[in-house]
Amino acid sequence: MIIVLKPNATKEQIEHVMEKTKKMGLEPWLSEGVERSIIAVKGEEDALRALPLEAFPGVERVVPILKPYKLASLDYKGEPSEIDIGRGVTIGGKKVVVMAGPCSVENREMILNTAEAVKKAGALVLRGGAFKPRTSPYSFQGLGEEGLKYLAEAGEKTGLLVITELMDVRNIEMFEKYVDIIQIGARNMQNFDLLKEVGKVRKPVVLKRGIANTIKEFLMSAEYILAGGNPDVILCERGIRTFEDFTRFTLDINAIPAIKSVSHLPIIVDPSHGTGRWGMVSAVSLAAIAAGADGLLVEVHPNPEDALSDGDQSLLPETFEDLMRKAARVAEAVGREV
Ligand code: PEP
Ligand code: MN
């Protein structure tokens, strides 16, 4: 950590900062410049992070050298992680893993039909919400446990793995029974109690980026799950809020190479929530693969006109099939496969 001192910092103020860091078992080293001086501090940065150094008179700024996340960092692991999600499927390797299905599980027949359709097109994982985080309490809230049962049945019938969103710590046992991958939604990215609990679970977790969160905050949330003991965390970029209102959210394509440069965790992209418009989903999916995404999470509905949630951004099965064909070609161009 580097402590940048104010140009007019007095000798006493500088000594006070040096003493304080020494008391914490760290080694401060003063470098006196012409215009201003700095103190380089050697030792456990975490200890120093707890100290509100910018509150000390004479201190202008503190520049951390290490990242606040450790287990999620690329330095910690040394290479990208490949995460086993079951049935011989891994995320983070050569294969771009496509997860597809409706926003919500609406009834048994529709999830069974959609599962067949996305399987035929080449998806490996079936998505579908049974507990829905809706903005309005009057909107469809999901089928609950009944929805999880239908998802599990669809997974068994098709051989697809199943992913669905967990919102409440009280439902963890139920999820362990029915699902292969637990999704933590954007609205819960900083629900730290929920993150701690899924840290104890022995299932892979897809952690979606919060709608107003930075990449650093995103990785700190992943750190919670990793620190809890669950190493199988997959990140999902799903768009953030910006001033742009043409689309529902602004998909941050930068996040893919940015995260890959600092973290070993795989990152997938949700082009459905990221755009909010079905007509843009294919283009953005292909861009995500070209940018290095390890997978996609796409909403597909057999009849979007009648969807109980997110019909506007859902692909028809035939459009999804077309996307899968194009995705295979883009993946090949960047040394991957779908
Ligand atoms: C979803 O995937 O169904 C969902 C609600 O997504 P998000 O949490 O990204 O809004
Ligand atoms: Mn949705």
Image (tube, rainbow, N blue to C red):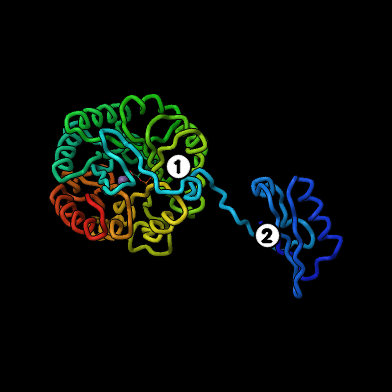
The image's mark for residue 188 is 1
Residue 136 in view of the camera: no
Residue type for callout 2:
Ile
Residue type for callout 1:
Asn
Left or right position of 60 against 279: right
Residue pictured at 80% horizontal, 70% vertical:
8
The image's mark for residue 2 is 2
Residue 139 vertical position relative to residue 18 in the rendered view, above or below: above
Left or right position of 119 against 172: left
Residue pictured at 22% horizontal, 44% vertical:
307
Quick one: quadrant of the N terminus? Answer: bottom right
Callout 2: few (<14), some (14-19), or many (20+) C-alpha neighbours within 10 Å? some
Q: Secondary structure at mark 1?
A: helix
Residue pictured at 41% horizontal, 46% vertical:
265
**Badge 2 residue CB within 8 Å of ligand 1:** no
Q: 121 or 229, which lies in front? A: 229
**Badge 1 residue CB within 8 Å of ligand 1:** yes
Name of the residue lying farthest toward the bottom: 34
To which quarter of the image does residue 141 belong?
Answer: top left
Q: 262 or 75, which lies in front? A: 75
Residue 322 in view of the camera: yes
Q: Secondary structure at mark 2?
A: strand
Left or right position of 124 against 116: right
Residue 320 percent coordinates (x, y): 18, 50
Residue 177 percent coordinates (x, y): 33, 24
Label located before the other in sequence (2 or 1): 2
